[in-house]
């Protein structure tokens, strides 16, 4: 339904990007002497002449990589941050690939000229796409190019569709209203225009472009009748199966030996997002372990001197898609603390279980210091390396607490569980995670690698302050 640009614009983008690549390739080679002022560059007397074949190979490889990243896909990258993130990673891969091509073929091409060429082309890609977004939004406002959507069914699924439409008005879409056969709903809600029988008249009267059928399972016998009427009208028809309410986070259709099947546990992250997140985790964790290993050794020695062995505490936690794994922590409680868990558990005023408290008598002297500055969490970096956890994500929960979850709360397991996350930087132990699942769902719905970086930076500050940890 949402499409930021047409196929014609995508084709134009490809040709324009080719021109940008070739122009800056020529420009940086022709004005290569200007870079002689740089201390690390060789002195070049005049303009450089590049082999003609590079003007064909460079755009071909670069555009192919951007195609594979979905830069030219009108249905993807609706948000500006998503488009720029996708563009940035495609440019990084293209730069590495083109550098490899030059290494294997024309090694005499100036490295300074090549780096400047990549940077200039990248910033030009960004600038003209920003301008295109601004012009697109202005054109929609001035020419009243509004995409009108009608929803059949004012139930839970229909209302969720309406919320998504209202949240994306800036893409030029507008909610016309609902159709629903419940007379009580129609009298109570003015946005319900009529019963579903009047769908033809409503579509014509309001110039509807898309009709979304969001009926409950019990009303699906009406779908055939509605689609028969709509096939005679110039509208697109979208059907939302009521099974989507059973999905862990969202559902996807996949082809299985020629049969379309619905995956009710489709991962919340795309393959490219998952690959990027995993690479980010491994690289950053490996770098952080270099200074952290000596600190871990000191922590282990402090635990040993204070309360003896064991040093580490292994606990079963619920991971992505409900898989059980062993999470590692430095031991901060007395030996056998789990056996007396029931004696310290408390409930709040609503009867919700609070399993973590400030005055827990089981915590050792060293343990209180470790918990205050989250030093007990350091062994979880090895969980990250093993792939059972991520640096950022919803916190892995205790299985016996998950058994008390409501179905919607289980959606927090749709992505890898993390060492820190959106919930942790908004309260830590002051906010029991099983009572604030909304924070985790916010992270899942707004995931980006930039959000991960922001959370990690804020986590460092919160840990140094020792706020909300016990």
Image (cartoon, rainbow, N blue to C red):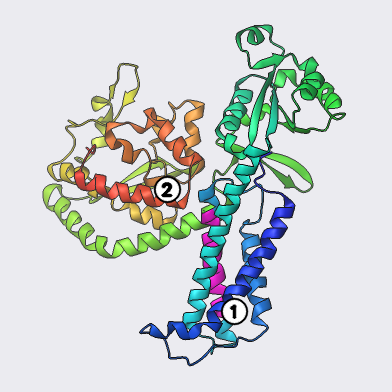
Q: Position of residue 143 (x, y in %)?
A: 68, 38
Indicate whether residue 91 is drawn in magenta. Answer: yes
**Residue 374 in the figure: left or right of residue 420:** left
Tell me the residue that label 1 is attached to: 26
Q: Position of residue 157 (x, y in %)?
A: 62, 25
The vertical placement of 209 against 418, above or below, is: above
**Residue farthest along the bottom direction in this orientation:** 45
Task: From the viewer's side, name the closer residue of 265 and 323.
Answer: 265
Indicate whether residue 200 is drawn in magenta. Answer: no
Q: Residue drawn 50% across and 80% down?
A: 113
Label 2 Cα neighbours within 10 Å, binned few <14 / some 14-19 / many ≥20: some
Which residues are the magenta region?
84-100
The vertical placement of 90 against 217, above or below, is: below
Q: How many marks?
A: 2
Label at residue 451 = 2
Q: Is residue 389 visible?
A: no
Quarter residue 19 falls in: bottom right
Q: Is residue 144 visible?
A: yes
**Residue 400 in the figure: left or right of residue 246:** left
Q: SS for tag 1?
A: helix
Task: From the viewer's side, name the closer residue of 321 and 223.
Answer: 223
């Amino acid at each position: 339904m949402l499409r930021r640009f047409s196929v014609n614009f995508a084709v134009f983008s490809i040709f324009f990007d080719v021109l940008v690549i070739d122009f800056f390739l020529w420009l940086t080679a022709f004005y290569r002497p200007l870079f002689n002022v740089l201390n690390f560059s060789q002195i070049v007397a005049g303009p450089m002449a590049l082999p003609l074949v590079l003007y064909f190979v460079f755009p071909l490889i670069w555009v192919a990589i951007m195609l594979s990243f979905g830069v030219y896909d009108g249905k993807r990258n609706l948000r500006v941050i998503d488009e720029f993130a996708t563009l940035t990673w495609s440019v990084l891969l293209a730069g590495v690939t083109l550098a490899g091509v030059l290494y294997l073929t024309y090694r005499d091409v100036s490295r300074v000229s090549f780096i400047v060429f990549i940077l200039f082309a990248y910033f030009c890609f960004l600038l003209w796409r920003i301008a295109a977004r601004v012009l697109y939004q202005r054109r929609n406002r001035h020419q009243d190019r509004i995409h009108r959507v009608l929803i059949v069914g004012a139930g839970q699924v229909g209302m969720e569709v309406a919320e998504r439409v209202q949240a994306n008005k800036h893409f030029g879409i507008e909610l016309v209203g609902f159709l629903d056969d419940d007379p009580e709903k129609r009298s109570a809600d003015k946005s319900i225009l009529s019963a579903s029988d009047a769908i033809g008249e409503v579509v014509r009267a309001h110039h509807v472009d898309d009709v979304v059928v969001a009926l409950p399972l019990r009303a699906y016998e009406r779908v055939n009748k509605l689609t028969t009427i709509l096939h005679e009208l110039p509208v697109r028809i979208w059907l939302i199966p009521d099974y989507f309410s059973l999905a862990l986070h969202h559902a996807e259709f996949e082809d299985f030996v020629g049969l379309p099947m619905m995956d009710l546990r489709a991962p919340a992250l795309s393959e490219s997002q998952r690959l990027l997140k995993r690479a980010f985790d491994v690289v950053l964790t490996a770098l952080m372990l270099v200074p952290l290993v000596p600190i871990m050794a000191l922590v282990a020695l402090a635990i040993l001197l204070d309360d003896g062995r064991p040093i580490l505490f292994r606990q079963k936690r619920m991971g992505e898609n409900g898989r059980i794994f062993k999470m590692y922590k430095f031991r901060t409680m007395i030996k056998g603390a789990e056996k007396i868990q029931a004696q310290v558990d408390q409930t709040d005023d609503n009867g919700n279980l609070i399993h973590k408290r400030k005055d827990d008598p089981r915590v050792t002297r060293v343990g209180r210091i470790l918990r205050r500055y989250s030093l007990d969490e350091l062994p979880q970096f090895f969980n990250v390396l093993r792939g059972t956890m991520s640096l950022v994500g919803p916190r892995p929960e205790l299985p016996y607490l998950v058994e008390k979850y409501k179905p919607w709360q289980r959606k927090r397991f749709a992505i890898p569980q993390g060492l820190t996350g959106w919930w942790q930087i908004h309260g830590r132990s002051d906010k029991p995670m099983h009572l604030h699942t909304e924070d985790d769902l916010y992270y899942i719905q707004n995931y980006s690698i930039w959000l991960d970086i922001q959370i990690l930076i804020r986590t460092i500050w919160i840990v140094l302050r020792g706020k909300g940890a016990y």
